[in-house]
Image (cartoon, helix red, strand yellow):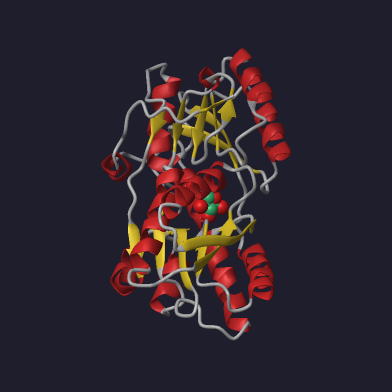
Amino acid sequence: MRKILGMAALLCAAVLAGCSGGGEGGQAAAGEDAITVGFSQVGAESEWRTANTRSVKEALVAPDFTLRFSDAQQKQENQIKALRSFIAQGVDVIAFSPVVETGWDTVLREAKAANIPVVLTDRAVNVSDDALYATLIGSDFVEEGRRAARWVIEDSQGKDGPIRIVELQGTVGSAPANDRMRGFKEVIDGDSRFEIVRSQSGDFTRARGKEVMEAFLKAEGDGIDVLFAHNDDMAIGAIQAIEEAGRKPGTDIRIVSIDGVRGAFEAMKAGKLNATVECNPLLGPQLADLIREVHAGREVPKRVMVEEGVFTQDQADAELPNRKY
Ligand code: GZL
C-alpha cells in the first residue's frame, strides 16, 4: 500500500483566490453541457467542515455543474454507498473527502471500470495504485503538525522540563489525524523537555473533545502543561472541560490547535486559546477548476496544495474581521 503524497506540482493560494467559481450563483438552470458531479462529504462534524461544504456548494453551481451531494455522517460505509450510487447514476465526475485513509481500492476500481474520474478533496487515501484517482487537492497535514510543535517550542522558551503535553487526535485512521500526529511528534521529539503523556481521539468534534479532556484532567490532575488538539472544535470543547475543572485555559494549560475557524479566533481573543494553525477549507473554486480540467481529459497535477499560515493570540483581534470561515 503506498501512501499517496505525490507532490507533482503546487498551485498557490492565488489560484484559490483568483479562480472563478462554478458559474453564477442563484438558481440558473443547468446548462446542456453541465458537468454532473457526485460529491460525498465526510459529514458536518466541525466548523471547518461546514465552511468546506459551503465552499464546495457555492462553486459547483449551474449552469456549469449539476451537483449531487451526499453527507456520510463520518461513516465510511455511507461514503462507499454514495460512490456506488454515483456510479450507478453515471455521473461525469466523482469528488469526495475520504473519512479514513484505507478501504477504498474496491469502490475506486468500480469507478475506474465505469470510466468515471475521481477527484480527492481535503483528505488523502492509501491505495495500491494512485491511478485510481486523478488528483488530490488539500492541505499538508504533516506540515500543520510540525507548525503546531514549533509554536509549542517557541512558547516554552526559558521553561525547564518536564513539559507535559496531552493530545486530542482527530478521527482514528483519517489522514489529518495520522499526519498531524506524525508532524507534531517529528518536531517535538527533538526537544527532551517535552513528553506527550496522553493521546486519544476526540473525533474532531467539540463534544468528544470535551469528554476526552475531562478524562485527561481526571487522570493527570495538575500534571498537564500543554494541549495540542488536531482541530479547533476539539480545543473549544476541551476549554470548557478545563474551566469546569477550575483551571484557566490559555494560562494554566497552553493550547494550540489546527483549522483557524472563527471560533478559534474568538477563543484567542478571550485569552483561552493561544494559537491556531490555519487549514483552509475554502477549496471550492480550485475544486471546480480541477473538475473542469479532469472532465475535459486534460492533465492535472497529482497533488494540489493550498497555502496556509499560523495565527497567535496577539493577532486575533485584528484578524477576526478578515476571517472567511
Ligand atoms: C482537515 C479536515 C479536518 C479538519 C477538521 O482538512 O479534514 O476534518 O481539521 C475536520 O475540523 O473535521
- Percent position of residue 183, x then y: 45, 47
Residue drawn at point x = 48 percent, y = 54 percent: 51
- Within the image, what quadrant is residue 161 found in? bottom left
Can the viewer see residue 156 in this picture? yes
Does residue 10 appear left or right of residue 165 in this picture?
left
Residue drawn at point x = 58 percent, y = 79 percent: 222
Please tell me which residue lies in front, 80 or 146: 146
Please tell me which residue lies in front, 193 or 120: 193
- Where is the C terminus found, in terms of image quarters? bottom left
- Up the image or down, 193 lies above or below 2; here it is below
- Percent position of residue 276, x then y: 41, 62
Kindly give the residue lying farthest to the bottom in the view shown: 246
Residue drawn at point x = 31 percent, y = 35 percent: 11
- Up the image or down, 136 lies above or below 280; here it is above
- Within the image, what quadrant is residue 112 found in? top right
Residue drawn at point x = 63 percent, y = 77 percent: 221
- Where is the N terminus found, in terms of image quarters? top right
- Percent position of residue 57, x then y: 49, 45
Q: Give the total number of marks visible in the rendering.
A: 0
- Percent position of residue 155, x then y: 36, 68
Please tell me which residue lies in front, 200 or 121: 200
- Up the image or down, 234 lies above or below 12; here it is below
